[in-house]
Image (spheres, rainbow, N blue to C red):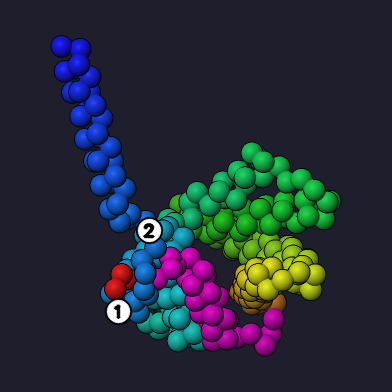
Amino acid sequence: AAAAAAAAAAATLTARRRRRRRRQSLPSATSTPSTMSADPMAYAKQLKGLMAQSDGKDKVLALVQYAAMFASGGEAGTALSVQKSFGAARKPFRLYKPFEFVMPILQNPPRGKALAVALEYTKALGMAVYMGCDHFVWAGQAGVLTDKKLAADMQKVSFWGWFVASVAGLVEQTNALNAALDEMSAAADEVEKRAAAVRVQKIMFGIVTNSAQGLLALSLLEKIPAMDKRKTGALGIFLSLLNCYNLAPPLKAKTA
């Protein structure tokens, strides 16, 4: 009887191992496929992945908003109405944003050199002011806030917060670029050089984005006389495309 029980237990264990091996041999849903596909459906899925994010929806709406600004040139008409409508449509996706920018520095205060710490705080607080004051603008547009002067002042403070945060990000990225270039120069082999080059490329993307943000904020504040509504709209389109590119998930590869 004991021998029969042992044999049964051994058979059960063997069957479990076989089932486990079969499951492990199945292709994983998250595994990297072998070949890339550039068919239209792949791009459609990429766009779907972008729109699944609240930030993605916000940036796509921003793209349409600035395209309408470019088309209208600030003149009354359908394009200007579209610009205002899409600008208002972005607001719900930003409700939690002020907390999203502030919470990380409250939970994990930045450490290190004084300049780096100051830049982190400036970026976070500047973006929180940008998003938070924009809520007052939204309230004014919705008729909840009846003080039009306060709403207008909050709009200016919002753009200034965006500008300050962008400048802080630009300084931070510039310092990071210098460090990355030094690493590239000191790289001992091609592998290290390629890794440093990838890092430099990402930092350069951040520098371009922060520069465009700062310039757009000043343009919206009407502090750059040469930037009329059409040029501001063109800059906004450029920045929105950068943000969409940055947020969009990578194209799914397709198994041959």
Q: Can the viewer see residue 47?
A: no
Based on the picture, tell me whether residue 10 belongs to the magenta stretch.
no
Q: SS at mark 2?
A: loop
Observer-side mark, 1 or 2, equals 2
User: For the residue carrying disc 2, how many other residues have a C-alpha within 10 Å: few (<14), some (14-19), or many (20+)?
Assistant: few
Residue under label 1, please give it: 40
Extreme-right residue of the structure: 114
The one nearer the camera, 27 or 89, is 27
Disc 2 marks a residue whose amino acid type is Ser
Residue under the image location 37 percent in, 75 percent down:
36
Task: Provide the major secondary structure of the magenta segment.
Answer: helix
Task: Kindly identify which numbered label has been placed on residue 155.
Answer: none
Disc 1 marks a residue whose amino acid type is Pro
The quarter holding residue 216 reads bottom right
The quarter holding residue 161 reads bottom right
Marks 1/2 in contact by CB < 8 Å: the verdict is no
Residue under label 2, please give it: 31
Q: Can the viewer see residue 108?
A: yes
The residue stretch that appears in magenta: 224-252
Q: From what the image shows, is residue 181 above or below residue 77?
A: above
Residue under the image location 30 percent in, 79 percent down:
40
Q: How many marks?
A: 2
Q: SS at mark 1?
A: helix
Residue 244 % position (x, y) = 47, 71
Residue 220 % position (x, y) = 61, 74
Answer left or right for 91 relative to 130.
left
